[in-house]
Image: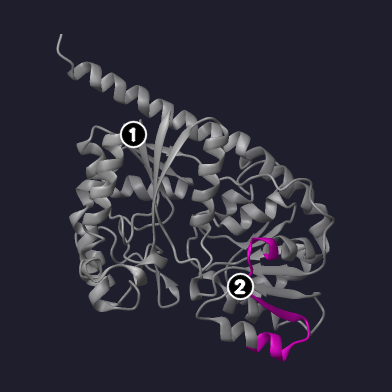
């Protein structure tokens, strides 16, 4: 089987779980014998584009002329079995779906966020969850509130893109919903059940976990929806040193909050942005990973990484986090999920510290059962194979007798 994996990479300076997942899936598929043809563009490359291409950037989310030309050439040359799309914005555009279909190639898309409806993809603005654009043909509230990159002009462009590509998205042959919540989002958008498959992301096995370290690690993009302010509010409700160390890794607009907390308290350390090896070391030094977004985070990669490393997670009960931690199953959970308010989180912190050693084996077991490559890669290949069989059947129906 030959598969084109299409993805517009997020900026490398900002931690992206989606970039990690795409790289991981490519490696896992290749190891399983699938011929993978990466078709990727990087937002980091925008600064180096020729002037002629920069002039077209405002309309690239709608059409992406250069990407369509290059994809068409790849499809003609390689004749793949399908295209697997992840993030199309801004340089690929959803038009890659139309380009693939024009060449008779079916399309699978993994849905990592709510971008079919929401300009930011988060259903979150001004510090709270928001679905004001849901059900609207054009997302005027997203323009009014400058939800895309804080710009009314860019938000208008994204809202236009979402309106133009409503039929494009509805033509995708198979959607991969990471959780049941995403499947419900797709059904609400008008996608029939027979084109939705629920399959989570997975990560490579880092090996047997190291002994638990001490304290807590918060590792995320330092932006409002990731819950840093919530965590620091809860943390300050305990005396300095009462909970052991809190280490904060990441970068973003809320970096001053992390730096201020580290300056004020002896039990808070700001590690800055870490590379992959740095993150491995930071997880090893911790006993509990904290993931406390206030938006409906779909499937935070930081939680997958924590469970693979045998670290329990203290999370919020939003988005896909209860599912990730196994709280919806009868087996032992991989951690705790609490309502995203400071008082509730403050009460949970000492409990998590005291019970970390008891929950750690369940975290590792949850990873092995649900998110190990042996599990999720097989599921993904089965999705590919099922779609290829459907496509072959349709081709046969259209063939002359």
Label 1: how many residues lie within 10 Å, few (<14), some (14-19) or many (20+)?
Answer: few
Residue 2 locus on image (x, y percent): 41, 32
Which quadrant: the C terminus? Answer: top left
Q: Residue, x 44% and y 53% (percent of image)?
A: 112
Q: Magenta residues, as a range?
A: 260-278
Of 347 and 75, nearer the camera is: 75
Q: Is residue 273 magenta?
A: yes
Q: Which mark is residue 78?
A: 1
Q: Residue, x 23% and y 76% (percent of image)?
A: 153
Q: Is residue 350 magenta?
A: no
Determine which residue is flagged by label 2.
273
Of 254 and 279, nearer the camera is: 279
Res 15 quadrant in image: bottom right
What secondary structure is marked by label 1?
Answer: helix
Q: Is residue 102 left or right of residue 377?
A: left
Of 331 and 83, nearer the camera is: 83
Q: Residue, x 78% and y 75% (percent of image)?
A: 245
Which quadrant: the N terminus? Answer: top left
* Residue 123 visible to an observer of this rendering: no
What secondary structure is marked by label 2?
Answer: loop
* Residue 226 visible to an observer of this rendering: yes
Residues marked 1 and 2 touching at CB (< 8 Å): no
Q: Is residue 309 left or right of residue 177?
A: right
Residue 73 locus on image (x, y percent): 26, 42
Is residue 371 positioned above or below 64 on the image? Answer: above
Is residue 35 positioned above or below 279 on the image? Answer: above
The Cα–Cα distance between marks 1 and 2, rounded to whole angstroms, is 39 Å
Res 335 quadrant in image: bottom right
């Amino acid at each position: 089987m030959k598969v084109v994996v299409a993805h517009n990479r997020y900026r490398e300076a900002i931690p992206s779980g989606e970039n990690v997942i795409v790289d991981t899936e490519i490696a896992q598929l290749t190891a399983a014998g699938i011929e993978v043809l990466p078709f990727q563009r990087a937002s980091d490359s925008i600064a180096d584009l020729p002037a002629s291409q920069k002039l077209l950037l405002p309309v690239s989310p709608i059409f992406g002329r250069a990407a369509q030309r290059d994809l068409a050439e790849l499809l003609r040359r390689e004749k793949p079995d399908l295209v697997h799309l992840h993030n199309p914005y801004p340089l690929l555009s959803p038009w890659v779906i139309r380009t693939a279909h024009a060449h008779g190639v079916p399309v699978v898309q993994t849905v990592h966020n709510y971008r079919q409806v929401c300009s930011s993809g988060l259903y979150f603005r001004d510090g709270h969850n928001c679905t004001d654009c849901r059900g609207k043909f054009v997302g005027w509230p997203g323009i009014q509130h400058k939800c895309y990159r804080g710009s009314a002009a860019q938000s208008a462009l994204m809202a236009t893109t979402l309106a133009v590509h409503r039929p494009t998205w509805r033509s995708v042959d198979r959607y991969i919903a990471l959780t049941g919540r995403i499947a419900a989002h797709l059904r609400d958008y008008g996608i029939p059940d027979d084109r939705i498959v629920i399959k989570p992301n997975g990560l490579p096995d880092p090996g047997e976990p190291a002994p638990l370290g001490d304290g807590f690690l918060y590792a995320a993009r330092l932006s409002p929806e990731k819950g840093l302010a919530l965590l620091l509010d809860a943390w300050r409700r305990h005396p300095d040193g009462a909970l052991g160390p809190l280490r904060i890794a990441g970068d973003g607009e809320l970096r001053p909050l992390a730096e201020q907390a580290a300056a004020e308290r002896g039990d808070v350390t700001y590690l800055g942005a870490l590379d992959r090896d740095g993150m491995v070391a930071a997880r090893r030094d911790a006993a509990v990973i904290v993931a406390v977004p206030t938006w409906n985070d779909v499937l935070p990669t930081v939680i997958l990484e924590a469970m693979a490393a045998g670290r329990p997670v203290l999370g919020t009960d939003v988005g896909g986090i209860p599912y990730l931690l196994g709280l919806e199953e009868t087996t032992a959970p991989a951690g705790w999920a609490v309502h995203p308010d400071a008082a509730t989180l403050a009460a949970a912190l000492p409990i998590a510290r005291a019970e970390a050693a008891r929950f750690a084996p369940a975290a590792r077991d949850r990873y092995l059962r649900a998110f190990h490559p042996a599990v999720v890669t097989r599921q993904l290949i089965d999705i590919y194979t099922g779609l290829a069989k459907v496509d072959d059947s349709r081709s046969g129906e259209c063939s002359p007798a």
